[in-house]
């Protein structure tokens, strides 16, 4: 019998999301194999004995560890499951582990009748008859008695399993295994995935020393409120290490918060308020207290920190004032709370001698080779025929993890002549300049469509929902879905658990630098304007040109008092397709306004409706959140191409649009439209509508 070690589930850090228990001869090469792949593809780390037990190790010990280190268990009960004493021992141990914690156990009844398990009839009866017959032949009386007691444990375990219910192949999907597997994965992902688990890059290599240093500090038993700083150059892996530590350690605390991109937020006028709100939301168990101003936020944070042991991570701290504020907050924290921060500037730490610090250095050659190989070859080492080329690239990258990941992904599957060309190009750049290393991945994209798509995402869509971006950019004649996949393959882009596009800030900066180089001294000749400084200059001076295809201007990002501009500033932007404004007022007529606009994102719009002469015909997406609209348009407007309409938080809007003009509409988002009392009955004409959000609207619909 496998013996169960004592586990304190309240502080357990799990190595696996799922443990698969199954009878190998029944399902190893078919159903269980397909289920395992589906779980892995869904991002769920899954233990199965033929994949995860290392040769030479004690199999029982490895299985015991796998069971205890899993967040959930799936029992694939097939026809011959009960014939295996090994499977039954596994089941007993899983049930003991479950009874000590609140983890999920999901029984799957695969081509067996669940009533046979409950009644212990049919195949279960036959299996136990065979076990009893075998054990009765044992000569030693004591051993025979122990074996018969084991049978009783098995019977009790099966009864307990049957009482849990479970999923029956025939009942749920009429025997269709692919549909059945999708349902299983959906249930497991819903129950196991938690909001406070942060996404981190796969193939973690060379971080053991860093983890050891932080874990010693976290678990030293001190009740002091302490600060630990990870410092190093950009792209060296500080954030990845901090995320891993947070994921594996937050269960030791009563709450936690991971505040990412502090430097980026601090550049915004409302950045500190946003960070205060995020911190309060995280440590207030999902509630989002209102914060009116910085002083209000300080008082509420001080109150929320009281009496709870917390783990707080502050990523990318870059100013002395930020660090001073962190150390000033320590006296508010409860005993034993810990603060981890990452920074590129070690000089910030000099004024705080009691801060534990750790330098995250670039990787050694061996670790660099392994990380690069995982991305370039999907293996831990390069094939012999690529060893020389790999070493040349490793020499140029000088152990910078982000460069290794991106460059490795860009060369995956490429022929030797492409490798030679990439190496020659790489050798012409200074390795320390990461922008140039990253640009090689950009240039390796299959065609101009993907390169232009990358620039659109870098300038306007980082952090936006993929589903909306696909609609908008497909209308701009991109092949967005496959293009996004190509960017992900080269580690230029990721999609988070919420379906949003995420691009590393260094990669985003590289893309924007490519646009800037189109005309370094004349922003009016850039294809895209994303920064308020250049956009403000172009609109104030009315110097826009036909080169401009996208423009963003957020007045919250600037201290300028000017918020009103003349529509004439857009008259020469004939190719403008993407327009993103916040708290901007435009004066004048729209007869000469660009006619090819696909995306209008205009937050904080101050008028009661959009102008009658606005060029609507090409628009596929309108986003007018937080505006003073009372209705979208006056009269009938040509909105035949519109697929996305977002009027969320428009508290003055009293009526929905006439949907007879919106027959291809796919997404209608009216969240928190407090004055909206009814939806026009013409909504029946919006045959393509796939999604509608009326959350927090007061009317009856």
Image (cartoon, grey):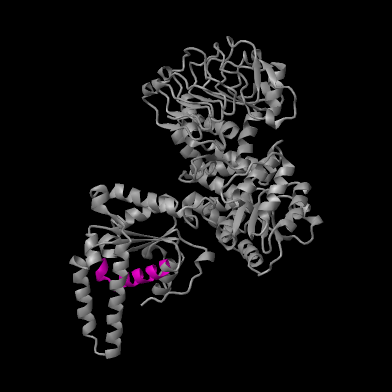
Q: Position of residue 306 (x, y in %)?
A: 68, 57
Asked whether 601 or 447 is in front, the reply is 601
What residue is rendered at 30% in x and 48% in y? 178
Of residues 312 and 425, which is closer to you in this image? 312
Residue 112 lies left or right of residue 427; in this view the side is left
Q: Quadrant of residue 593?
A: top right
Residue drawn at the location 60% of the way across and 61% of the way down: 253
Residue 590's place in the image compared with 61, above or below, is above
Q: In the image shown, does 665 or 366 lie closer to the viewer?
A: 665
Q: Position of residue 565 (x, y in %)?
A: 68, 17
Where's residue 333, x and y in %?
Answer: 70, 58
Q: Is residue 459 left or right of residue 55?
A: right
Nearer-the-camera pick, 575 or 408: 575
Q: Is residue 472 left or right of residue 460?
A: left
Residue 91 highlighted magenta (yes or no): yes
Q: Is residue 316 visible?
A: yes
Q: Answer yes or no: is residue 522 visible.
A: no
Residue 439 at x, y percent in the picture: 60, 38
Name which residue lies at 64% across and 11% down: 588
Quadrant housing the N terminus = bottom left
SS assignment for the magenta stretch, majority: helix
Read off the magenta span. Answer: 81-98
Q: Is residue 153 magenta?
A: no
């Amino acid at each position: 019998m496998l013996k169960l070690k004592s586990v304190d589930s309240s502080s357990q850090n799990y190595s696996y999301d799922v443990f698969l228990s199954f009878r190998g001869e029944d399902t190893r090469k078919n159903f269980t194999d397909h289920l395992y792949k589906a779980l892995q593809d869904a991002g769920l780390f899954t233990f199965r004995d033929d994949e995860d037990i290392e040769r030479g190790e004690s199999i029982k010990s490895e299985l015991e560890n796998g069971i205890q280190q899993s967040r959930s268990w799936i029992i694939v009960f097939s026809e011959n499951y009960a014939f295996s004493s090994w499977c039954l021992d596994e089941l007993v141990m899983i049930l003991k582990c479950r009874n000590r914690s609140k983890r999920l156990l999901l029984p799957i009844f695969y081509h067996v009748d669940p009533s046979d398990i409950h009644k212990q009839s049919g195949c279960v009866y036959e299996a136990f008859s065979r076990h009893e017959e075998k054990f009765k032949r044992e000569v030693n009386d004591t051993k025979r008695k122990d074996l018969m007691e084991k049978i009783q444990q098995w019977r009790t375990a099966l009864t307990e399993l049957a009482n849990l219910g479970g999923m029956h192949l025939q009942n749920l999907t009429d025997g269709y295994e692919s549909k059945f597997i999708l349902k299983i994965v959906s249930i497991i992902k819903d129950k196991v995935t938690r909001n406070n688990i942060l996404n981190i890059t796969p193939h973690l290599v060379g971080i053991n020393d860093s983890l050891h240093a932080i874990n010693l500090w976290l678990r030293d038993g001190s009740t002091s409120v302490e600060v630990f700083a990870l410092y190093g150059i950009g792209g060296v892996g500080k954030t990845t290490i901090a995320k891993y530590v947070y994921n594996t350690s937050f269960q030791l605390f009563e709450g936690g918060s991971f505040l990412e991109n502090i430097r980026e937020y601090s550049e915004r006028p409302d950045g500190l308020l946003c960070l205060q709100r995020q911190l309060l939301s995280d440590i207030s168990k999902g509630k989002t207290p209102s914060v009116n101003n910085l002083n209000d936020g300080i008082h509420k944070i001080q109150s929320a920190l009281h009496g709870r042991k917390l783990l707080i991570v502050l990523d990318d701290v870059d100013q002395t004032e930020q660090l001073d504020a962190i150390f000033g907050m320590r006296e508010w924290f409860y005993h034993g709370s810990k603060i981890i921060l990452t920074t590129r500037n070690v000089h910030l730490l000099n004024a705080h001698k009691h801060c534990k610090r750790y330098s995250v250095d670039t990787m050694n050659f061996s670790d660099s080779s392994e990380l690069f190989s995982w991305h370039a070859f999907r293996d831990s080492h390069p094939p012999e025929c690529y060893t020389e080329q790999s070493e040349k690239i490793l020499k140029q990258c000088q152990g910078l993890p982000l460069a290794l990941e991106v460059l490795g992904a860009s060369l995956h599957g490429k022929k030797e002549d492409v490798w030679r060309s990439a190496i020659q190009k790489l050798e012409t750049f200074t390795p320390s300049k990461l922008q140039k290393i990253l640009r090689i991945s950009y240039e390796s994209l299959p065609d101009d469509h993907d390169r232009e798509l990358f620039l659109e995402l870098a300038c306007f869509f980082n952090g936006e929902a993929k589903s909306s971006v696909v609609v908008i950019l497909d209308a701009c004649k991109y092949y967005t879905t496959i293009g996004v996949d190509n960017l992900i393959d080269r580690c230029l882009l990721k999609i988070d658990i919420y379906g949003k596009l995420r691009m590393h800030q260094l990669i985003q900066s590289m893309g924007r630098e490519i646009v800037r180089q189109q005309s370094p001294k004349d922003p009016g000749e850039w294809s895209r304007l994303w920064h308020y400084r250049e956009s403000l200059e172009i609109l104030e001076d009315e110097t826009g040109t036909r080169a401009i295809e996208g423009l963003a201007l957020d007045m919250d990002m600037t201290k300028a008092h000017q918020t009103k501009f003349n529509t004439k500033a857009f008259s020469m932007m004939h190719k403008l397709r993407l327009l993103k404004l916040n708290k901007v007022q435009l004066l004048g007529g729209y007869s000469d306004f660009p006619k090819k606009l696909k995306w209008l994102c205009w937050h904080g719009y101050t008028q009661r409706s959009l102008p009658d002469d606005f060029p609507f015909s090409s628009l596929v997406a309108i986003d007018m959140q937080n505006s003073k609209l009372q209705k979208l348009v006056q009269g009938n407007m040509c909105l035949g191409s519109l697929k996305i309409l977002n009027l969320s938080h428009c508290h003055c809007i009293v009526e929905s649009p006439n949907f007879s003009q919106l027959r291809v509409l796919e997404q209608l988002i009216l969240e928190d439209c407090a004055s909206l009392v009814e939806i026009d009955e013409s909504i029946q004409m919006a045959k393509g509508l796939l999604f509608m959000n009326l959350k927090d609207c007061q009317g009856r619909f």
